[in-house]
Amino acid sequence: MKIYRSIISVIAFALSIYILISNLFCTCFTTGDRFQMNYFSGDIVIFNLLAIALAILGVIFCDKLRIREFANKHFKVIKIILLTLIAVIGVVFALSCGLGTTADQLELQTSVAELRNGNIDAFRPTGYMDIYPNQYGLGLLSYLASFIVGTYNYTFFRLVNVLCLVVLYNELSLIGKQIGLGKTSQLLILLTGVFFMPSTLYALYIYGNIAALTLSVLAVRLIVQAFEKNKALYAVLSCIAMFFSCVVKSNQMIFAVGIAIYCLFKSISVKNYKRLIVVPAMILCVWLSSFIPLMAMRILTGLPLNGGVSYISYLAMGVQENDQNYPGGYNGFNVDSYEQFGGNKEAQTEYAVQVYKESIAEMLEEPAYLLNFFTRKQLHQWADPAYKAYMCTQTNPEHDTAQWFYEMLRPEHAYPVLIALSFFQVIVWTGIVLSLWFVKKQKHLEEALIMPLIFIGGFIFHTFWEAKSQYVFSYFVILFPISLLGLRLFKESFEARDKTPLKEKIKKLNNTKLSWSFSFTMAAAATVLVFAEVLGLATMRTQLPQDRALYKEYVSKTYIESWNPLSDGAYILTNGDTKIECELINKGDKTLIKEKNGNRYLTVDNGTASWQEKNDSLTQAYKFYTDGDKLAIGFNDDYILWFSDGEARVNYVLYGTLMHSRLDDSQIWHFEKIG
């Protein structure tokens, strides 16, 4: 296991130092709307260092407050209370966020609903499910669940996510116990689950993130127990958990690879060669997790289903810029090029390889841009304190969203929370760095290195793949136990430190012959990355203060570019020859258009507009975008409402706003407030 320990420790330490310094100097803010604009805000480093110092002092002097004694005495009761709080907060959020959803979440559930009705268009070439066959697993589970809970039942899935969230933090707490954390630290992991807002917000995200992460962490805990208790049953259960995790989210195979590597070295170390069977078993589970959903969907649709965007297109996209100011992020290249070749995967692959080679060649010609590109790419992924959790939720609020919940998500209210999360993030990475530096002092060393091993896989994969902080969220959460372990090891080292006077230490050092050591190797590896990062940050010296000012302006204007409603009251809305006297009623980020002298509401159904009784559905909910006396009326997020020859028109547009869409004059309304 020496090779395993040394390689994992050195690489994880170097990468953690890189991310820690990234967070010391920068915080990446993502706008809370579907535009996902990113701002690389330069940090005040002294404040971050102060936060680290206070956290370390708190750890050193916590025993004087008798916290450990209290935690040990009431451990079970406190644990139940904390897990209950995680569940209660999650349920309240799930019942308050509204009944709708957007983007990929909606596309997936729509595909399932259509499949239930015998419509398989989404699975035909260039349809949504054909483009993204990695969704077959989650789609199949949603399809099976629909026979019990119906289609579009987002509340059900959110409540399932809340249950998974409770299990996730309980599993992280148990893993903390396995690597040597005491009861106080185990409870701190659960306390993190109460206050770490991004994980709770992701429980509202119907995309498999939380469920898949929970199953993966469960698989890690079970495989450790398989060796600890020498019971094959735990290894079997670990493989089953990993299978379902990859069914829900295919990128969880990174966890499976980490578990397989751990089993390989651990089996050889303890000379339990029978356990080597876990390695091919994990590989088989990953393969089956894609094969079984594929076969099931072929049976359900009767289609060959040999499509799907080329994986190379994600790599090609990972070295391109995008309009949201985070390089390597989604810019539509994978889908556009797939549709360009009519769903021909082989042709798209050839094209993607060519684009990738050209992009890399251009970067190599400009080393400064190469450093700048990947520095911004990593900052976007690892220096975003919310990991896009607010964005994922703020694109969803509907007219039925609870007002308190909607207000909580508003940028001006979210900003202080993001600042607090940025300090939390710096402290967590400090603990991770300390853990890896003092890792040789840890009794359960191999077990403590599983999560850093998986983190390494995630870091490397998303350095080259399509980038998004949402994708690396899992690798941050799984390191919570490791961070607490690092703070505890630092405390123990501090208490056992050599108290020899400084002069004698220097004298002794002068008479000592220095040698290459493990610690020196870790420091040398970290220095290589830090040197590259310093050069990369230097290329951003102008952008960091500019982005900071721009994000503050965005917050102060409360994302005017994505939503700028009219106040409640009576209005005359004019669009060409169409004139409507109405009363506007704002609900969350949507607006209802009511008859001025009646009780009916403007309703759009199948592209036609009429006045109908209130029905509390999206057919009567609009999003208003204003600029001066100009108005764009958004409908169902991706459409705008206008009239032609007295008849309603509902047209698909890129964004639906005055500032981001090129709307014709005929599609723009004018308004006058009359009461």
Image (tube, rainbow, N blue to C red):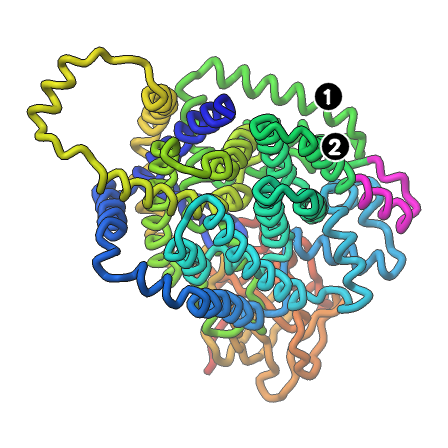
Q: Position of residue 659 (x, y in %)?
A: 50, 51
Q: Which residue in the structure is indicated by mark 2? A: 340
Disc 2 residue type (three-letter) = Gln
Residue 69 relative to residue 285: left or right: left
Q: Dividing the picture into quarters, in which one does residue 669 lie?
A: bottom right
Residue at 30% from the left image edge and 37% from the top image edge: 25
Callout 2 environment at 10 Å: few (<14), some (14 to 19), or many (20+)? few
- Looking at the rendered structure, the secondary structure element under dot 1 is helix
Question: Which region is colored magenta?
Answer: 291-306
Q: Which residue in the structure is indicated by mark 1? A: 350
Residue 114 relative to residue 453: left or right: right
Q: Position of residue 515 (x, y in %)?
A: 29, 13
Residue at 32% from the left image edge and 20% from the top image edge: 520
Viewer-closest of 197 and 638: 197
In terms of secondary structure, what is the magenta stretch mainly?
Answer: helix
Q: Position of residue 235 (x, y in %)?
A: 67, 42
Q: Dividing the picture into quarters, in which one does residue 276 lie?
A: top right
Residue at 45% from the left image edge and 34% from the top image edge: 378
Labels 1 and 2: the sequence-earlier one:
2
Q: CA distance from mark 1 to mark 2?
A: 13 Å
